[in-house]
Amino acid sequence: MAFRLLLAVAVGALALDLAAALGVNYGQVADNLPSPQDAAVLLRALKATKVKLYDADARVLSAFAGSGVDFTVGVPDNLVPRLASNPSAAAAWVRANILPHLPGTSITTVTVGNEVLTGTDTTMLRSLLPAMESLHAALAACNITSHIAVTTAHSLAVLSSSFPPSSGAFRHDLLPYITPLLAFLAKTNSPFFINAYPYFAYKADSGSVDLDYVLFQSNAGVLDAATGLRYGNMLHAQVDAVRTAICAADYGMAVEIQVSETGWPSQGDDDEAGASPQNAARYNGNLMRLAAQGKGTPGAPGEPLQVYVFALFNENQKPGPASERHYGLFKPDGTPAYDVGVKAPTIGGWKGSGNDNGNGANNGTGGGAGLVVADGPGETGGGVGPGTGYYTISSATLKVKRWRCTGSSPLMAVIFLMVYGLCWS
């Protein structure tokens, strides 16, 4: 009873703050993270109603049963060729990773691979769409395609041109893969996921790129002369460049764009310009404010932009430059990586090994010291950077066509088994 009351209060607060569009990526490339139950405390403090995983971790999905949080789960890259060549493998994956968690946990989207089209493996490129089709067919056999969408996340490197936004175009060498993929998304009413990082553009050319423009701060903006639209921040320009590319392929009116990853690192190597707690707080704080306001881009002002912030935690085992290990809103002990505004309870039971600074030098004292997160200090208000290629960063959410389960009464369980029981045979 107490849990239900707490949940009702939390859900009510979310509704009042209009934060339904805020999603958070929950990566786990680390050896010192707190339990999923503790992660749930932090996500409630963020007022995030959507969580994106890079797998279908049963511990996480079980921990969030009855929470009302909508999950995006992922099929890892290494399973894509198998699902493409063997439909029974897709059915087995659904039985093992989706059905055990329904209806208690709300799963709304499955991503197949991550940034596959900008990789160099031709087998993966050819396998992506068939794998998505096989997975969709497996979900259809269970009568849950109206509740669970199938998509894949892309790097901005799928574009050959991105600035100004009106010149957005897909790379010619990828059109044979992207065109039928767009047709699949339109047919199945699934979103186009894009990983977009203004940070990469600033890092690559900090002398020319206006920091206020990439951080959603007050600035003169950038005019797209072809459309007359003025962009007050780079993320919206990046999204509208993708929108132009999709429209050029004649699928613009049917495919929703969601930002599956975006964020800003709080620390980096000496040559990583702009990676600081102050800039991370401004970027993510202003981004959360925009999400809460339900704002769209200049190219689609009436369509709230769904966003997944990358990421929930700093992940100490990610490869690459130091910034890759410092995208988290929180350190593994539950303390904030930087201040974005709102207080929340201390998490308990942390037993991490203490490697949070990217070099393994946190000392691992354990136990959070409270956390501070939320709106942040900034205000609202080019070029683009390619995706990292790492299996990590994130920022998007899903629209209202979702099957929302906030409890699991005996009657609901019986109905579920009657409707979906054939999938277990």
Image (cartoon, helix red, strand yellow):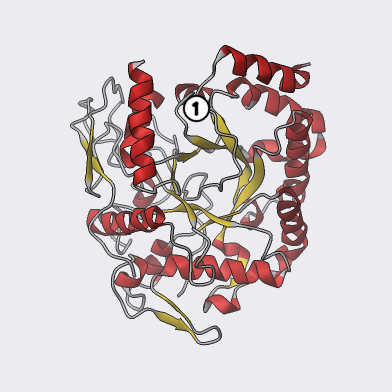
Q: Nearer the viewer, residue 190 or 6?
A: 6
Q: Is residue 417 left or right of residue 67?
A: right
Quarter of image, res 194:
bottom right
Residue at the disc numbered 1: 406
- Which quadrant does the N terminus fall into? top left
| Residue 170 picture location, percent across and down | 66, 68
Quarter of image, res 40:
top left
Furthest residue toward bottom: 225
- Which quadrant does the C terminus fall into? top right
Q: What residue lies at 34% left-to-right and 56% top-to-bottom?
A: 289
Residue 189 in sight from this viewpoint: yes
Residue 41 drawn above or below residue 292: above
Three-letter residue code for mark 1: Thr
Q: Residues within 10 Å of mark 1 (few under 14, many from 20)?
A: some
Q: What residue lies at 44% left-to-right and 65% top-to-bottom?
A: 235
Residue 170 in sight from this viewpoint: no
Q: Nearer the viewer, residue 284 or 148?
A: 148
Q: What residue lies at 63% left-to-right and 41% top-to-bottom?
A: 77
| Residue 321 picture location, percent across and down | 38, 52
Q: Is residue 17 left or right of residue 193?
A: left
- Tally of numbered discs: 1
Quarter of image, res 9:
top left
| Residue 296 picture location, percent across and down | 48, 63
Residue 240 drawn above or below residue 377: below
Q: What residue lies at 62% left-to-right and 52% top-to-bottom?
A: 191
